[in-house]
Image (spheres, rainbow, N blue to C red):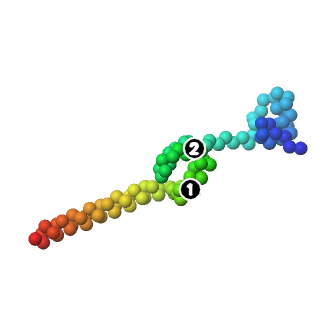
Amino acid sequence: MTYRINGVKVTKEEFNAFRAGTEFVLPRVMISRDYETYNCPVTGKPIDGKREHLANLERTGCRILEPGEKEHNERTRKERADQALEKHIDQIVNQTVGR
C-alpha cells in the first residue's frame, strides 16, 4: 500500500504519525521556483516561466550561454574593434605621409 500526505509519498510510520497528530518532519519535499518573468531579447515579448523559456529558445533558435561565454564574446568584440581602429589609423597615416 502507498501512503501519501498532500501528494507526497511517505512511509507507513510517517502516515500514522501524521494521523495521530504527532509532529514530524515531512521528508523528501523539494520546492522548486519557476523562472522570473523577463522580456525576450530577440522578440521583446514577456517570457513567464521555465516552460515558456524553453519554448522561446526553440522558437527563436537560441540557446543558453555557457559559463564565461558572454565575457569571452565581449572581449573578442573589443579586440576586433581595437584592431579595426588600428588599421584605420594606419591607413590615414599612410595617406597623409604618402602625399
Quadrant position of residue 94: bottom left
Location of residue 55 in the rendering, given as x and y in whole percent from the top left corner: 59, 53
Label 1 sits on residue? 59
Say whether residue 66 is left or right of residue 83: right
Q: Nearer the viewer, mark 2 or mark 1?
A: 1
Location of residue 13 in the rendering, given as x and y in whole percent from the top left corner: 85, 37
Of 26 and 94, nearer the camera is 94
- Gap in Å between the C-alphas at discs 2 and 1? 15 Å
Q: Residue furthest bottom?
A: 98
Q: Are marks 2 and 1 in contact (CB under 8 Å)?
A: no
Please, what is the three-letter code of the amino acid marked with disc 2? Asp
Quadrant position of residue 98: bottom left
Say whether residue 21 is left or right of residue 44: right
Element carrying mark 1: helix
Element carrying mark 2: loop
Vertically, is 24 above or below 72? above
Please, what is the three-letter code of the amino acid marked with disc 1? Arg
Taking the spot 34% from the left edge, 63% from the top edge, the residue there is 80
Label 2 sits on residue? 48
Q: Residue furthest top?
A: 21
